[in-house]
Amino acid sequence: MFLKLPEEYNGTEKEYKAKLSIDTPSYWKDIEKEKTYTDNMFQQMLEELNDMETEMLINNKETKVKLKIEKKAEFNIFLFIRMNINRIEYKYEVEKEFEEEDKDIIELIHIEKIMDDFYQQIQNFKIAVNISYPGLLEIRETETYINNKHYKYSNKPLSSLLISVTEANRDEWPKINIINISKSWNWLKHRKGFIKGMATNSIERALSALTYIYDCYSYEDLFYSIIVIEAIYVRSKQGILEQIKEKSKAIFGEPKDYMKRLKYMYNVRSRFMHGELNFPPRYCPYNDTQEFIQFEDKEYLNALNMAQALLIASIQQFVLINTEEIEFELKVKK
């Protein structure tokens, strides 16, 4: 036997636990104005998460999970997610490929499959929370445990969504809502293709793109943000900008210079994709040269902030009316 089950993993009934390190909000330009929003909403989010009970899909079964917030210091906040799995009730198809006598191997495969499902559902839940409280649940590190024995560690880069949200709040467009977490999570769970790992329609494609924004490296988030916007608003290759303008205007109203801002966002994306825009190397994410500041502050971030604000505000509309598609009707003025 070259693989042996650790003694701590024994037992038909096991507790699976994840420990998520929550990053506290950062402030950007108008500190006083942003602090009021972020501090109040961040605390409200933590209170809603604390002692929450819900379900996650494990091996195609709705499984009860319990959440707990632990705050050891101002910058030391953890979200614990726990579930109990009965070995007999959660058998995976892949386990049947092995001989019955290889019990340790079968058990280790079972544990790994459970953990894969658990980790995926935690990431989906993170998306739901950020639909409810955009940009306020940033997870720096995730640790998983089985029967309190450490299993795996992972870390992810943080998103810039909160910057985009505060910019939208400052411009008062588009309207960013705060939504009950259970409402967002229940809506998200009904997007079956997304939950199971493969999008099957436009809103699920938008949600899949949204996951890349939270785990992006460097400048990928602009591209994925625009993928979300087009998945929601665009139905043909003709007049893409006009489709986005008219449909988003129908939901949020039209801010000043909207078409100009929309064209600017697409111009930056196009110049980037076609190799016309100067940008820094991957491992040099920031420097204080005038050229970098021009790129980061004057071009890229302006385009990104608009794209991310529009995408999260748009997805919130799907949650609020509990649908996966919004139909738009063209009318002729008389």
Image (tube, helix red, strand yellow):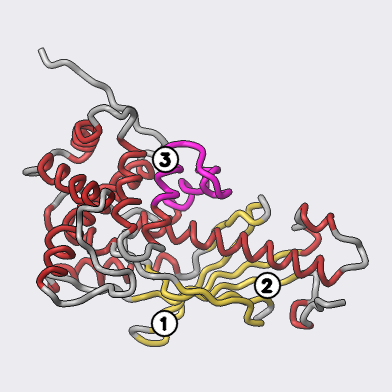
Predominant secondary structure, magenta span: helix
Q: Position of residue 314 (x, y in %)?
A: 30, 44
Mark 1, secondary structure of its residue: strand
Depth check, mark 2 against mark 3: the one in front is 3
Image quarter in which the C terminus is found: top left
- Which residue is the site of mark 3? 203
Give the residues drawn in magenta, as a range: 183-209
Q: Position of residue 187 (x, y in %)?
A: 46, 46
From the viewer's side, name the closer residue of 13 and 115: 115
For marks 2 and 3, the one nearer the N-term is: 2
Q: Amino acid at mark 2?
A: Glu
Looking at the image, the residue that sits furthest to the right is 101
Distance from disc 1 to disc 3, alpha carbons, whole Å, reads: 35 Å
Which residue is found at the position 20% from the left and 18% from the top?
331
Looking at the image, the residue that sits furthest to the left is 256
Quarter of the image where one finds residue 233:
top left
Image quarter in which the N terminus is found: bottom right
Which residue is found at the position 30% from the left and 46% from the top?
226
Distance from disc 2 to disc 1, alpha carbons, whole Å, reads: 22 Å
Q: Amino acid at mark 3?
A: Ile
Mark 3, secondary structure of its residue: helix
Q: Position of residue 5 (x, y in %)?
A: 79, 77
- Which residue is the site of mark 2? 15
Circle 2 crowding by C-alpha within 10 Å: few under 14, some 14–19, many from 20: some
Magenta residue check for 319: no
Q: Is residue 244 above or below residue 27?
A: above
Q: Amino acid at mark 1?
A: Lys
